[in-house]
Image: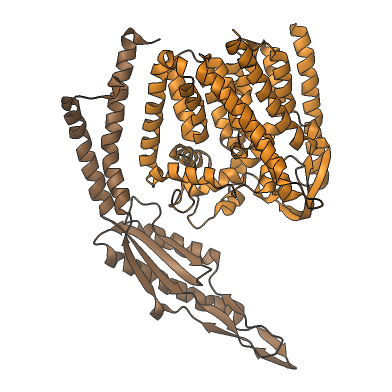
Chain colours: A brown, B orange
């Protein structure tokens, strides 16, 4: 076990090497924020003309539309956080019937994020109307010998949006990552010492 | 002797070929893979694609609560970089599989290379090239290998490392091999624990015992930092996984079992009559009894490195269903070690019997049938899932290996 021990001098060397890395990690991670926007998605809504006719609510934006918008904004948004391949994310939460847009960036970039989020929401709204006009507007349902336009649009409720800005990393995660370089360099150091000891003819 | 060996191995290879032809014929006629392949035929390669999906997404250890160390995800990121096109963030694991279907081929090649390397290392001093080829093809045609390939499990990457770990004479190489293996499949840490339990050998083995955890920690921390996620939560996820007995359902556990403890799951599949729970408890009790007795022999005696390695694999494949049936692949280097045992012929025959697929030609009990979207054929087909004779024979054979090995250890070290 004495091979795991280090002297004060060695501890100081480890700290000198590890502390700049730890400080860099702390500042870098502590500075990161995530930004999330939730908006109720638009739907094509069918009126209940007949007793046996269900009240249909069909989402207007499809997976391929999301991919299209995502590709358009992915490059634009890279200036917010070029290191983060997760940014941005755009998806539909089926359980909440909402669009969710999320970014990651640094403190101070909240305005940039909001501008891009607004751009994405505007595009989503345009696609909703476009899809409604193409796929649902002209659908007629025969009911009681009449053919009626059955679908109306209930567009995205952008006035009812929720914006969340949080620190990306938990405090415990940042503290742990801050300590990790010291631990790693200590382990590397004692491993090196052990290997040197073995190479000096102590290898069995 | 060599001629006799070749005849026996040739006969086993012939049986393996018959079984393989049966699998191909069954697929051609029914459009899905027969038992013992995984019962959910929509899920082919999903061990690989689920992990690959998460390797590019945030939340590996917080949302998915993964029990895989970061090295797995870095390996898959590298695989994606080398062999796949762009994977969009909006894709889920099934979409990735649909779009990147052809890019599973490099993994299949890697799987074959892993077995090839393992056989080459393990049987270096034993057989000539003909024997090695026989063994290689028996393994490649075995349901154990095919099952792991069908799941897309990275267990196959560990097999050459295990051979390297067992057969290298160098302490540093051995420690490094174990460190990498533990960073791929954490339960392989039992290989280390059992060496610590062998306390009378600790002094001789102390350099390895010191270096292996240091190497493992270095790999874990560096890969964790590169992955840049909450990798330190992995050990607690692992404890949660081990404690949660409800994770594996009956059909999962009985898809390709290696341990008789899986028999406790028959209660969950068989509806026609009640199976008393005592049977499940008894099988566990018997397995744990022999495992603990063997561990006590290891604890009280100075056991050779080879014997501890053999028992490590017997332990891992017998103690629980969590290792998965493909854990039987760990026997590849162990078969070569059986040469050190007095009853090596019997042990080898039993282990090779576990690699045979002919047992699965005999259905015992059909537990479900229904329409299923089959990934491999791309058709919706009425499938029938059944328990085969192999589901019974393999775990019993593995338990017999445990009992025989315990007796060997007892005779070798207690009555010396």
Which of the pair A191/A160 is nearer the observer? A191
Residue at 27% across, 30% down? A186
Q: Quadrant of residue B313?
A: top right
Q: Quadrant of residue B216?
A: top left
Residue A105 at x, y = what percent? 31, 57
Quadrant of the image for the C terminus of chain A?
A: top left
- Residue B375 showing in the rendered view: no
Establish if B4 lies above or below B151.
above
Quadrant of the image for the N terminus of chain A?
A: top left
Residue at 43% across, 17% down? B202
Q: Is residue B37 left or right of residue B28?
A: left
Residue at 36% across, 52% down? A84
Establish if B393 lies above or below B335.
below
Q: Is residue B191 left or right of residue B391?
A: left
Which of the pair B181/A37 is nearer the observer? B181
Which of the pair B127/A145 is nearer the observer? B127
- Residue B388 showing in the rendered view: yes
Q: Is residue B83 left or right of residue B342?
A: left
Badge count: 0
Residue B12 at x, y = what percent? 78, 22
Residue B141 at x, y = what percent? 72, 29
Establish if B274 lies above or below B330.
below
Residue B149 at x, y = what percent? 64, 37
């Amino acid at each position: 076990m004495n091979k795991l021990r280090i002297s004060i001098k060695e501890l100081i060397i480890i700290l000198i090497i590890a502390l700049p890395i730890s400080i860099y990690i702390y500042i870098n991670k502590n500075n990161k924020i995530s930004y999330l926007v939730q908006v109720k998605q638009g739907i094509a809504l069918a009126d209940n003309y007949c007793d046996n006719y269900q009240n249909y609510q069909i989402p207007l934006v499809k997976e391929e539309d999301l991919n299209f918008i995502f590709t358009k904004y992915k490059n634009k948004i890279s200036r917010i956080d070029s290191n983060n391949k997760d940014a941005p994310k755009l998806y539909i939460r089926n359980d909440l019937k909402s669009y969710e847009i999320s970014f990651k960036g640094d403190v101070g970039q909240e305005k940039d994020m909001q501008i891009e989020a607004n751009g994405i929401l505007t595009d989503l709204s345009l696609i909703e109307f476009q899809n409604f006009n193409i796929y649902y507007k002209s659908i007629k349902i025969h009911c009681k010998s009449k053919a009626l336009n059955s679908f109306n649009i209930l567009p995205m409720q952008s006035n009812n949006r929720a914006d969340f800005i949080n620190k990306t990393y938990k405090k415990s995660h940042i503290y742990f990552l801050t300590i990790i370089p010291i631990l790693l360099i200590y382990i590397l150091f004692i491993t090196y010492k052990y290997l040197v000891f073995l190479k000096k003819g102590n290898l069995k | 002797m060599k001629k006799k060996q070749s005849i026996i191995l040739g006969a086993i290879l012939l049986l393996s070929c018959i079984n393989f032809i049966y699998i191909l014929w069954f697929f051609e006629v029914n459009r899905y893979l027969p038992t013992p392949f995984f019962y959910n035929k929509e899920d082919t390669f999903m061990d690989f694609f689920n992990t690959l999906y998460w390797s590019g997404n945030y939340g590996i250890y917080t949302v998915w609560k993964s029990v895989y160390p970061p090295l797995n995800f870095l390996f898959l990121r590298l695989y994606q970089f080398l062999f796949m096109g762009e994977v969009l963030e909006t894709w889920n694991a099934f979409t990735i599989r649909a779009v990147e279907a052809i890019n599973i081929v490099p993994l299949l090649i890697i799987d074959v290379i892993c077995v090839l390397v393992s056989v080459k290392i393990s049987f270096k001093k034993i057989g000539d090239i003909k024997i090695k080829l026989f063994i290689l093809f028996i393994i490649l045609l075995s349901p154990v290998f095919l099952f792991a390939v069908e799941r897309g499990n990275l267990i196959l990457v560990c097999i050459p490392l295990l051979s390297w770990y067992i057969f290298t004479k160098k302490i540093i190489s051995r420690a490094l091999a174990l460190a990498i293996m533990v960073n791929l499949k954490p339960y392989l840490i039992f290989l280390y624990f059992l060496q610590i339990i062998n306390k009378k050998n600790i002094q001789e083995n102390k350099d390895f015992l010191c270096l292996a955890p240091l190497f493992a920690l270095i790999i874990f921390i560096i890969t964790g930092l590169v992955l840049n996620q909450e990798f330190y939560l992995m050990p607690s996820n692992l404890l949660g996984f081990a404690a949660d007995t409800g994770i594996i359902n009956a059909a999962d556990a009985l898809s390709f079992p290696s341990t008789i403890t899986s028999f406790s799951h028959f209660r969950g599949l068989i509806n026609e009559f009640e199976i008393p729970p005592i049977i499940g408890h008894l099988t566990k009790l018997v397995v744990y009894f022999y495992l603990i007795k063997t561990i006590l022999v290891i604890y009280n005696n100075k056991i050779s490195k080879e014997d501890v390695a053999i028992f490590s694999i017997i332990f891992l494949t017998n103690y629980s269903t969590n290792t998965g049936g493909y854990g039987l692949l760990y026997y590849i280097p162990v078969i070569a070690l059986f040469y050190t045992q007095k009853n090596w012929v019997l042990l080898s025959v039993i282990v090779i019997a576990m690699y045979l697929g002919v047992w699965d030609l005999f259905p015992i009990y059909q537990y479900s049938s229904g329409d299923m979207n089959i990934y491999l054929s791309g058709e919706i087909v009425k499938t029938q899932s059944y328990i085969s004779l192999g589901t019974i024979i393999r775990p019993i054979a593995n338990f017999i290996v445990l009992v025989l090995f315990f007796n060997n250890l007892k005779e070798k070290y207690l009555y010396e």
